[in-house]
Image: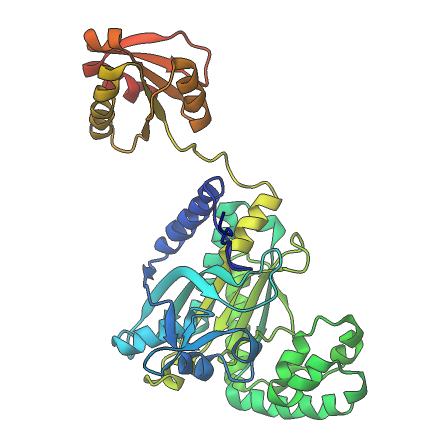
Amino acid sequence: MSKQIQAIRGMNDCLPQDTPAWQYVEQMLRSTVASYGYSEIRFPIVEMTELFKRSIGEVTDIVEKEMYTFADRNGDSLTLRPEGTACCVRAGNEHGLLYNQEQRLWYTGPMFRHERPQKGRYRQFHQFGLEAFGIASADIDAEVIMLSARLWQQLGLTPYVKLEINSLGSSEARAAYRDALVAYLEQHKTVLDEDSLRRMYTNPLRVLDSKNPALAEVLAAAPQLADYLDEDSAAHFVRLKQLLMLAGIEFSVNPRLVRGLDYYNKTVFEWVTTELGAQGTVCAGGRYDGLVEQLGGKATPAVGFALGLERLVLLLQTLELLPQLAAAADVYLMALGEQAELAALSVAERLRSDLPGMRVMVHCGGGNLKKQIKRADKSGAAIGLILGEDELSRNEVTVKWLREDKPQQTILITELAKALAVTA
């Protein structure tokens, strides 16, 4: 017997018992963004490697260690997308959607990063993101955050997530702060861990994001980015806080929140939870006004966020917030005898035509009534239909209630759709 092939580590199957939860979450996401006027955009899973080097930053963990990069047959360097914002900007530039226009876009799909797999963090993960282009004022930042807050409300997560915000300022302000931070860190080299030492000159703001408790005291005393903000960024941040307070959205300012991607400026935010252990970030985003121009387009302000669907589904499961999700079928049609089996598929097709949306499963493969009822029960259907030779001769079908204590009844096939419509 040949060796069984298994899935790649960190790339997981989503089994039939799990997909209803995913469908529920995806539908909530779609309906929420639609209520704000966002339109869906779809882009390829594979992009030119240069796209991510220029957008995410060559000295980030993603580009240095995590991307799935390979040479295709033409010798081009290609990469499985590790995130969606750069892809969205590339598509917008390529198809003339961004310059001197306002666009509110959303996307969803698989992303890929070669990380150490753990609960809530996988090598193939599914991301939902949205991006708003062409609006420079803080009101669009507030709307993006308000949209995410409405999503938590819809899912019942509001009590379990907290909003943290910060401002990274302009690139010039951040450069001045970077110099001050590097000078400070140089004075504490002896206590910095290996990761922090590696990042100190290439991406020093990421040192502030260190989860090493041994560095907590040193980082707490580091220079504050807020002291280096330019006037425009400071006013933008004040306006954002005003808008969030007016909307009744609670937040805390986290001066250590810097995000892991190079393209952010001004507003950055995260929704965090304490319900998932180390994987505490549920949703994150911010403003990236320079990225469109950096990737070859005309200067265009932009803001957005992304969230991981695996982590969101896991959070809902952990908190037992998923509703009772529908079974695979509403009606299970059983057939006894050769002639009944021949007729069963036609009866089911007629039902599906007369009652669009009703899920009708037909028993295939024969078997006695006991076996078929067992299968009907396993399907989760509320109603079983029995079509035997006697029923067929009278153009009837027997209706059996599988979840309620009601007597069976016999109904003409021509009247079946009307009878089931009443029970639906």
Horizontal side of 130 relative to 255 (left or right) equals left
Where does residue 272 sit, x and y in percent of width and height?
A: 61, 60
Residue 331 sits above or below residue 23 on the image: above
Q: Nearer the viewer, residue 92 or 309?
A: 309
Where does residue 142 sit, x and y in percent of width and height?
A: 47, 65
Residue 357 sits above or below residue 341 on the image: below
Which image quadrant for residue 50?
bottom left
Horizontal side of 198 relative to 109 (left or right) equals right
Which image quadrant for residue 359?
top left
Q: Residue at x 57, y 65 (%)?
A: 270
* Number of marks in picture: 0
Q: Residue at x 48, y 52 (%)?
A: 151
Look at the image and tell me whether residue 175 can be seen: yes
Q: Nearer the viewer, residue 176 or 78?
A: 78
Where does residue 305 sit, x and y in percent of width and height?
A: 47, 66
Q: Nearer the viewer, residue 52 or 176?
A: 52
Color theme of the render: rainbow
Residue 286 sits above or below residue 119 on the image: below
Where does residue 150 sit, x and y in percent of width and height?
A: 48, 52
